[in-house]
């Protein structure tokens, strides 16, 4: 069973880029003096778009929504159309693991930030990763 037209319309309005969480993290990174690229596909032939990319350091930052990526702290499993949503979210999780492996094999470090994380704390974690790779 597919979702109802109302739910489908609501879900289609969910932003996939430039979300409040993403903008807050980018502001915090910028305040730390870091410069980066946004929404790039740094690996040729790999159709995975990275939210924040540090090309020289080869650090890829993905900002994961708690619902869409099944956050262990905040994920909710919808009761309506439960099988559909469980499959959707589990597929997203599997793709996340595959993305991490593909990027690691290409020499990149993947940093995942949950939408519920404090942007200042997450930015410090990303900054440390970039510094470690750049030095």
Image (spheres, rainbow, N blue to C red):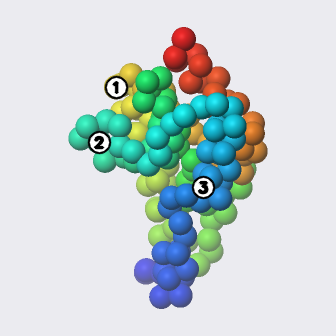
The one of 10 and 58 positioned closer to us in this rendering: 58
Residue 113 image point, x, y percent: 62, 42
The residue pinned by badge 2 equals 46
Can residue 66 be seen here? no
Label 1 – label 3 distance at C-alpha: 25 Å
Quadrant of res 41: top left
Looking at the image, is 61 positioned above or below residue 2?
Answer: above
Label 2 – label 3 distance at C-alpha: 22 Å
Q: Earlier in the sequence, mark 1 or mark 3?
A: 3
Looking at the image, is 36 positioned above or below residue 14?
Answer: above
Q: Residue at x 52, y 75 (%)?
A: 13
Residue 116 image point, x, y percent: 72, 51
Question: Are circles 2 and 1 on residues that touch, CB within 8 Å?
Answer: yes
The residue pinned by badge 3 equals 65
Residue 59 image point, x, y percent: 49, 29
Q: Secondary structure at mark 2?
A: loop
Q: Secondary structure at mark 1?
A: loop
If the image is split into quadrants, where does the N terminus sit?
Answer: bottom left
Q: Residue at x 57, y 39 (%)?
A: 112
């Amino acid at each position: 069973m597919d979702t109802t037209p109302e739910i489908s319309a609501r879900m289609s309005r969910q932003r996939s880029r430039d979300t409040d969480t993403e903008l807050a993290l980018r502001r915090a990174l910028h305040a730390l003096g870091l410069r980066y690229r946004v929404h790039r596909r740094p690996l040729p032939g790999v159709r995975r778009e990275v939210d924040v990319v540090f090309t020289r350091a080869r650090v890829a930052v993905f900002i994961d929504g708690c619902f869409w990526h099944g956050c262990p702290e905040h994920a909710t499993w919808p009761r309506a159309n439960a099988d559909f949503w469980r499959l959707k979210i589990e597929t997203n999780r599997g793709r996340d693991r595959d993305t991490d492996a593909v990027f690691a094999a290409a020499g990149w470090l993947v940093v995942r930030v949950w939408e519920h994380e404090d942007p200042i704390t997450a930015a410090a974690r990303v900054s440390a990763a970039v510094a470690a790779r750049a030095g």
